[in-house]
Image (cartoon, grey):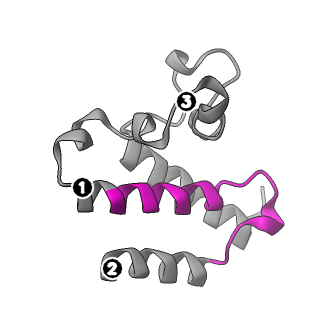
Amino acid sequence: MQVTAPGNVYSYGVVLLEILTTQLPVDEAFGEGIDLVKWVHTAPTRGETPEQILDARLSTVSFAWRKEMLAALKVALLCTDTTPAKRPKMKKVVEMLQEITQN
């Protein structure tokens, strides 16, 4: 297995998803053949909102903080795009995350 920049971005996105959802990357609860990335990316087809994907404990935090977590979720979704060429460069990921914390 060769390490690539798009692969590193994907891995970073998976870690972000783990943090935001408090789910493991692979869990039987997702269903057979479904991992965390697929579970998150297919949430809209199941009628789930981004808020429902986040760790339920985040529902008790301030609106501003939840807004930041939802923005971070969008970054994680970009990082875990199924097409490596569509994933942002890590420099762009850092810029997006910095922008979230500055707003």
- Asked whether 12 or 58 is in front, the reply is 58
- 88 in relation to 14, above or below: below
Could you tell me residue 74's position as x and y percent? 54, 58
Q: Reading the chain from its start, which is encountered first: label 1 or label 2?
A: 1
Q: CA distance from mark 1 to mark 3?
A: 30 Å
- Amino acid beneath label 2: Asn
Q: Quadrant of residue 30?
A: top right
Q: Nearer the viewer, residue 70 or 17?
A: 70
**Contact between labelled residues 2 and 1, with CB atoms less than 8 Å apart:** no
Mark 2 or mark 3, whichever is nearer to me: 2
Neighbour class for label 3 at 10 Å: few (<14), some, many (≥20)?
some
Q: Amino acid type of disc 3?
A: Val
**Above or below, comparing residue 6 to residue 40 in the picture:** below
Task: Name the main secondary structure of what is drawn in magenta.
Answer: helix
- Residue at the spot of label 1: 63
Q: Which residue is mark 2?
A: 103
* Stretch in magenta: 67-89
Rendered position, 50 above or below 88: above
Q: Residue at x 70, y 62 (%)?
A: 7
Viewed as shown, does residue 83 lie left or right of 42? right
Q: Position of residue 101 (x, y in %)?
A: 32, 76
Percent position of residue 5, x then y: 70, 72
Q: How many marks?
A: 3
* Residue position marked by numbered label 3 in the rendering: 26
